[in-house]
């Protein structure tokens, strides 16, 4: 079993405004090149010896994995729909405290978010909440002066957003670069501080399911290095640092993390923290860093273990957290780890709190059928079979409301999160599914998940900061289990 990690969270009191050099890398749309630019800049500035902190706008898990690989630091998500604005501001300030430069990668296009006519959930909203200068990445393929019209529209749509500079991507030649640079600067008054030529070696791999193992093996290091080389050669990095350094000071807000919920109680270390075992490896890796921190602040001791490395459920566990990831890609290995699956079954029988999301939900089922049609036996705690599809089954934000009291919520209470999966869950016909949530998204509402005793699982990836009392409830359930276990039978 590999060494397991403990998570500790240091508290900070409100104080004077604090200096945070920062940039938001936004695109004119998905595929404009903002991820390539983000990774190249992170690596280029890290080469200069700077401590670079990566952030990702929105609920995505893949880009933060890239950021962590490039910077060597845990990356963070900033989501202005799943969490309150005051929480996001405080979290950004706290998470960037020991960094010399924070680089925030946007989501989709600068103004794309949850709503068609508002900034909700968009990169632009996060730029305003963090008072961050924006570096706009514009794909200028097959454009000349029209590139100026595109940038001008982005500047005028929301004048409060500070588009401080532009990088033009996929230029056809040095002459093409000079043309679009002159057109944009003349029409918009925004400096074009560099450009990238068309280069197939800069293409980020598709988000295939082998991506994270490739990251762990270092197979993408040549791509990161090449992106940094191109950014160093084609962009004025000194000017970009000046823009980041000119961002106004930020003040720690110090308010509750959610306007509708009490703040998480921070417990002192009394040596009696309940232990939550967190599955963490290439199969289970979709966790928000602040979800883990909120559990730690609520009084938990978090221990990582790796089912893919053959680890069983840690014997000291008082609760289990199975996050999402790609268990279908490693289903044979998971199925072969009898210690892990038996540990899950024993935990469920003993009433240990067991919470699972998406990929973890699939592992609690009776089997997983992978894309090749092979069936792999799983824990069998949930009377259902997870089946992979070629087409995506769900994508989007979700607000989930408890249909009954659970590990996280009282009936009627809600959390926010998102779904993204290709599998579907087929429950056995003779079994009645005890749903965990009513899940509401863009296309309507429907019951979702599974709740039986202390076992709770669903496809939704929830964010505890949307209702932090849920973290307290989970820890309370783990503490109660710990006390009952320590008391022993007949006491």
Image (cartoon, helix red, strand yellow):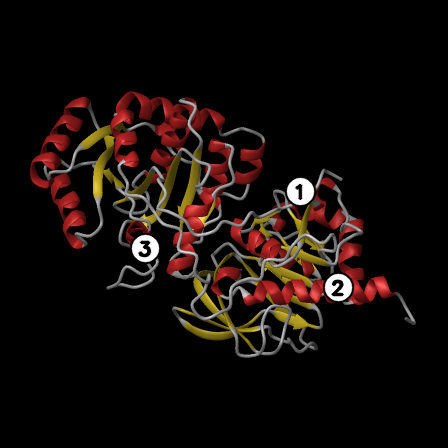
**In this rendering, which labeled residue sits more in front, label 1 or label 2?**
1
The reply, left or right, for residue 209 in relation to residue 163 is right
Q: Which mark is residue 352?
A: 2
Give the residue number, with chain letter if any, for mark 3.
122
Q: What is the distance, in whole Å, between disc 1 and disc 3 at their CAs?
A: 33 Å
Which residue is depicted at the point 50% across and 37% down? Answer: 68
Residue 235 in view here? no
The answer to whether marks 1 and 2 mark residues whose Cβ atoms lie closer than 8 Å is: no
Viewer-proximal residue, 145 or 66? 66
For marks 3 and 2 on the same chain, the one whose residue lies earlier in the sequence: 3
The quarter of the image holding the N terminus is: top right
Q: CA distance from mark 3 to mark 2?
A: 39 Å
**Towards the viewer: 352 or 473:** 473
Question: Which image quadrant for residue 429?
Answer: bottom right
| SS at mark 1 in the image | loop
Where's residue 235, x and y in %? 26, 26
Q: CA distance from mark 1 to mark 2?
A: 21 Å
């Amino acid at each position: 079993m590999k060494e397991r990690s403990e998570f500790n969270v240091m508290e900070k009191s409100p104080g004077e405004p604090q200096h945070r050099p920062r940039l938001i890398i936004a695109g004119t749309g998905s595929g404009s090149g903002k991820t390539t630019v983000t990774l190249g800049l992170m690596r280029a500035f890290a080469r200069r010896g700077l401590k670079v902190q990566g952030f990702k706008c929105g609920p995505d898990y893949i880009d933060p994995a890239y950021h962590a690989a490039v910077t060597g630091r845990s990356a963070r998500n900033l989501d202005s729909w799943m969490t309150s604005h005051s929480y996001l501001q405080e979290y950004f300030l706290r998470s960037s405290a020991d960094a010399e430069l924070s680089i925030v990668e946007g989501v989709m296009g600068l103004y794309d978010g949850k709503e068609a006519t508002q900034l909700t959930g968009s990169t632009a909203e996060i730029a305003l909440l963090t008072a961050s200068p924006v570096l706009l990445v514009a794909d200028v393929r097959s454009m000349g002066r029209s590139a100026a019209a595109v940038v001008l529209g982005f500047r005028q749509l929301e004048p409060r957003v500070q588009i401080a500079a532009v990088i033009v991507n996929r230029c056809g030649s040095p002459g093409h670069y000079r043309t679009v640079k002159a057109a944009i600067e003349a029409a918009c008054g925004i400096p074009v501080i560099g450009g990238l030529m068309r280069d197939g070696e800069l293409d980020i791999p598709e988000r295939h399911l082998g991506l994270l193992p490739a990251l762990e093996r270092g197979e993408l290091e040549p791509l990161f290095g090449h992106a940094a080389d191109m950014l160093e050669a084609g962009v004025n990095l000194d000017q970009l640092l000046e823009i980041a350094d000119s961002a106004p000071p930020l003040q720690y807000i110090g308010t509750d993390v959610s306007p509708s919920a009490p703040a998480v109680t921070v417990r002192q270390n009394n040596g009696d923290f309940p232990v939550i075992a967190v599955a963490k490896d290439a199969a289970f890796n979709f966790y928000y860093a602040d979800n883990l921190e909120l559990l730690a602040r609520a009084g938990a001791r978090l221990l990582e273990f790796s089912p893919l490395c053959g680890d069983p459920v840690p014997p000291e566990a008082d609760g289990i957290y199975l996050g999402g990831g790609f268990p279908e890609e490693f289903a044979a290995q998971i199925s072969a780890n009898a210690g892990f699956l038996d540990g899950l079954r024993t935990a469920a029988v003993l009433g240990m709190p067991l919470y699972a999301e998406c990929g973890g939900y699939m592992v609690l089922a009776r089997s997983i059928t992978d894309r090749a049609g092979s069936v792999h036996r799983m824990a069998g705690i949930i009377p259902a079979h997870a089946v992979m599809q070629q087409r995506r089954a769900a994508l989007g934000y979700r607000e989930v409301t408890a249909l009954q009291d659970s590990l996280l919520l009282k009936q009627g209470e809600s959390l926010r999160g998102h779904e993204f999966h290709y599998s579907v869950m087929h429950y056995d016909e003779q079994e009645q599914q005890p749903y965990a949530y009513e899940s509401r998204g863009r296309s309507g509402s429907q019951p979702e998940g599974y709740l039986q005793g202390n076992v709770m699982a669903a496809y939704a990836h929830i964010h505890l900061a949307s209702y932090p009392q849920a973290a307290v409830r989970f820890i309370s359930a783990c503490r109660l289990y710990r006390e009952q276990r320590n008391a022993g039978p007949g006491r």
